[in-house]
Amino acid sequence: MKSFFPIFVLLLLILSTGTLQAQQQYTVNGETYTLKTEVEGALTLLWNTIDGEYRYFSKKGNDIVELKNTKQNGDYQEEYKETLRQQTRDAAVSTEKVNLTLPSLRAFFVKYNKKKDPNFNEKEKSIDLQFRIGAFAGVSNSVYTENPTNELQAVAGIDFELIDVVKLKRHALVFRFKQTFESSEYKYSASQLSLNYRFKFVKTPKFDAFINTKFAALTFSKREQTYILAPHVFPNITYTEKTSGSDFSAPITFGLGADYKVGNGYITFNYNDIVGLNVESNDEFPVDFTLGYKFNL
């Protein structure tokens, strides 16, 4: 554990340096925005996340225009394409396949600037680390413990998610705290800190579906067991044994989940720890469902 933590902190610091990107205030149609510069040239691409939404702006000379894609009667109007056509009439670049996403817009702006200036130097693509935090609650039958009567237990916790919305938008690191509460029939409780990797095999502006892999976990647990002292002699005399301890492991468990965008955050559903490669189960069918809400920081 001691060797793992500093390595992880170092990795986080290295990744965090990628978020250092120029930001400046601009006034557009009477509104002031703090925007990042993604491409700078004859045509400059500005952007940021504002109230949880990605907003893109095109700057040519002193004129700044927002790139919009409004929806009417269920159809997107793609106004941004006409805006780009107007701004690039002096060195036309096709807008047919341009999407209102940062990678697609970046490619368009770079192509135009190279047409205007053969000496245009494309800077390395930036990354944009973002953070989400959320809370969840649910039930679990704790299949990776003894749980002899397969009792359901209440669980609750907090997720802290790290994502890069530019280069690695299908990937995420999640730090999770999960508390398992003892039930009336199974006197077991646990507090677990875990490190998880998520791959988003479905990625849309409104909905994500992902595979969750838990690859490191630190668990503090307590258990209370009651025994009959001498079943055949004194069947009514019992004694209780209380145990507690901690364990650091690499369980390599897999689960499934989904996020659905609502407001400035996401309703999130998880089916946790369905299969484990490096941990023993009690051979019961896994039941570990959580529902929660997370929002962008």
Image (cartoon, grey):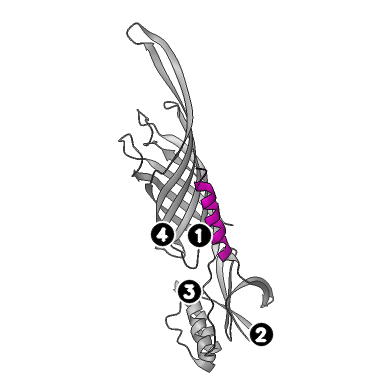
Is 244 in the magenta?
A: no
Residue where numbered disc 1 is placed: 163
Q: Position of residue 118 (x, y in %)?
A: 52, 90
Between 88 and 278, the residue placed more toward the observer is 278
Q: Position of residue 192 (x, y in %)?
A: 49, 40
Between 102 and 219, the residue placed more toward the observer is 219
Identify the element where label 4 is drawn.
strand
Secondary structure mostly seen in magenta is: helix
Tell me which amino acid carries mark 2: Asn
Residue sitting farthest toward the left: 283
Say few, some or many: other residues with alpha carbon within 10 Å of mark 1 (under 14 / 14 to 19 / 20 or more).
many
Residue 281 position (above or below residue 14):
above
Between 218 and 9, the residue placed more toward the observer is 9
Q: CA distance from mark 3 to mark 1?
A: 16 Å
User: Which segment is the magenta one?
Assistant: 2-18
Q: Earlier in the sequence, mark 3 or mark 4?
A: 3
Residue where numbered disc 4 is placed: 200
Q: Earlier in the sequence, mark 2 or mark 4?
A: 2
Q: Position of residue 212 (x, y in %)?
A: 41, 51
